[in-house]
Image (cartoon, rainbow, N blue to C red):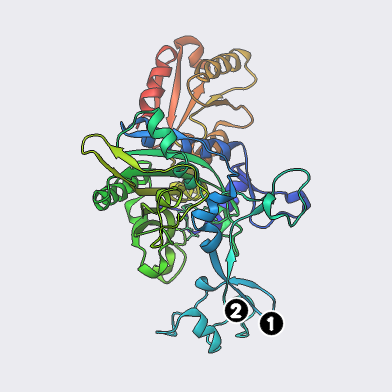
Amino acid sequence: MSAPNIETIVSLAKRRGFVFPSSEIYGGLGSAWDYGPLGVELCNNVKRAWWRWMVYERDDMEGLDSSIILNRAVWKYSGHEETFSDPLVDCRECNARLRADKLEYTMFAGLDVAEAIRDKGVKCPNCGSTDLTEPRPFNLMFRTQLGAASAEDDPTALAYLRPETAQGIFINFLNVQTTMRRKIPFGIAQIGKSFRNEVTPGNFIFRTREFEQMEMEYFVKPGDDENAFREWVTYCSEWFENLGIAKDNLRLYEQPKDELAHYAKRTVDIRYRFFPERADEERQWDELMGIANRTDFDLKAHSKKPEDADGKRLNPDSTEDLSYFDEATKERYYPYVIEPAAGVNRSVLAFLMDAYSERTTEKGETRVVLKLHPELAPIKVAVLPLAKNKPEIVGMAKAIKRSLQPLMRAVYDDTGGIGKLYARQDEIGTPFCVTVDHQSLDDEAVTVRDRDTWEQERVKVADLQQHLQTRLIK
Ligand code: ATP
């Protein structure tokens, strides 16, 4: 099973310290969330798993960490200043600000959303009025000012918080390629924060204005792009499946031409069933990650050489030419780029939803069991003493916890009866509980309990590290 809806995860996340509403003591801040002790571990584990899979387990990959604030010219030539916008509509009745492309207008077949609004055929989802303004583009980039002395409207001080990590990769393409002596095809991976002034953030951590992305730009010879694109779609779907997401809850979506971003030749989204409660099956799915064929758009756009028909440089500000010289064929070209881009936070939400299950005990009580993949679980093992008033047992349990902590995230807990302690660990997805009991003092062995089967096994303390490590690598 998986979570019946996002709300179930919101309450679990708050109750157990995964995610808290941000700035809550001041009434919160629209759709901002803080990651608590377990949430930060889960995010770190997702990022570590992605980096290991994307960078370490391949021979054709390098990593990068570029700045969040880049020269404004980057966003001018990437096309973001001009086109990185959502169509915004205001409701004249209740003043709600709405994203036109998310309004329900499909019943007016043949009309686009602007026409449907003009015909009074679209209702405000907030108040039901049909008195809506024409859609107008709203740029999603957060603006800021650089430098202490800059006046608020000084255009030379204008800068943006990056809305994607990708541009930092493109502008460093030659730096990475030459310093690491890479030959095409190869990729550059980056994980980092991105910012979008979303018109309608919401659905918990699904859409926020500040979020984290895991992106990779894979540079190939023009002509090899379509094949590489197909391979990356398969490879990325497998990543989610291998980390425990049920195949039934994943689906591919081919973006139609009118949905494609300005740089894309083709984009396939990997969708997850984020809204299983919706009666209309089509509306249960939304984007988890996107794989785009960005062609040579970005590298060319940032290069000094390309010219228009009149011989005028398309980019008079760039000092570099980001083309690649192929030694083997003596050809120079702008590589094509395949980009798999996933959100850390959306992935965390999908992993939490898919891991959610409920189980009934012999006493008829319902327990939540979070069946997270061991690699993602915030805590790998909890060491629990069966009697907390027996110093020898407590001492032994604490010593076991200390021996495990350099190798894996281990905790010690004696704040309840054993049934309660097990339930607590099940609910946060801890794969193993180690229990120290009276007999342990004699036989130097402990009980290892499995989260998913609730089966218990007696293991010698001397063999415990090895035993757990083997089982954690599923
Ligand atoms: P959407 O259509 O949902 O706005 P997008 O197509 O604009 O997303 P991309 O630009 O492809 O998103 O970004 C890649 C990934 O980054 C997305 O698949 C998603 O996981 C994540 N992402 C994008 N915007 C947000 C956001 N506002 N909040 C959280 N994650 C986001």
Q: Nearer the viewer, residue 388 or 224?
A: 224
Say which quarter of the image contains residue 90. Answer: bottom right
Position of residue 447 measured from the top left corner of the image (x, y, whole percent):
45, 23
Residue beneath label 1, please?
Answer: 93
Q: Nearer the viewer, residue 138 or 454?
A: 138
Q: Is residue 264 above or below residue 99?
A: above
- How many circles with numbers are drawn on the protein? 2
As drawn, the residue found furthest toward the front would be 310
Position of residue 25 measured from the top left corner of the image (x, y, whole percent):
77, 49
Decide: few, some or many residues near mark 1? Use Cα within 10 Å; few <14, some 14-19, many ≥20. Answer: some
Say left or right for 19 vs 215: right
Q: Is residue 449 above or below residue 325?
A: above
**Residue 352 can be seen in this image:** yes
Position of residue 178 measured from the top left corner of the image (x, y, whole percent):
39, 31
Decide: few, some or many residues near mark 2? Use Cα within 10 Å; few <14, some 14-19, many ≥20. Answer: many
Say which quarter of the image contains residue 309. Answer: bottom left
Q: Nearer the viewer, residue 273 or 231?
A: 231
Position of residue 13 measured from the top left corner of the image (x, y, whole percent):
58, 47
**Residue 368 can be seen in this image:** no
Mark 1 or mark 2, earlier in chain? 1
**What's the mark number on residue 160?**
none
Q: Is residue 473 above or below residue 446?
A: below
SS for callout 1: loop
SS for callout 2: loop
Q: Is residue 88 above or below residue 133?
A: above
Q: Nearer the viewer, residue 436 or 432?
A: 432
Residue beneath label 2, please?
Answer: 124
Q: Amino acid at mark 1?
A: Glu
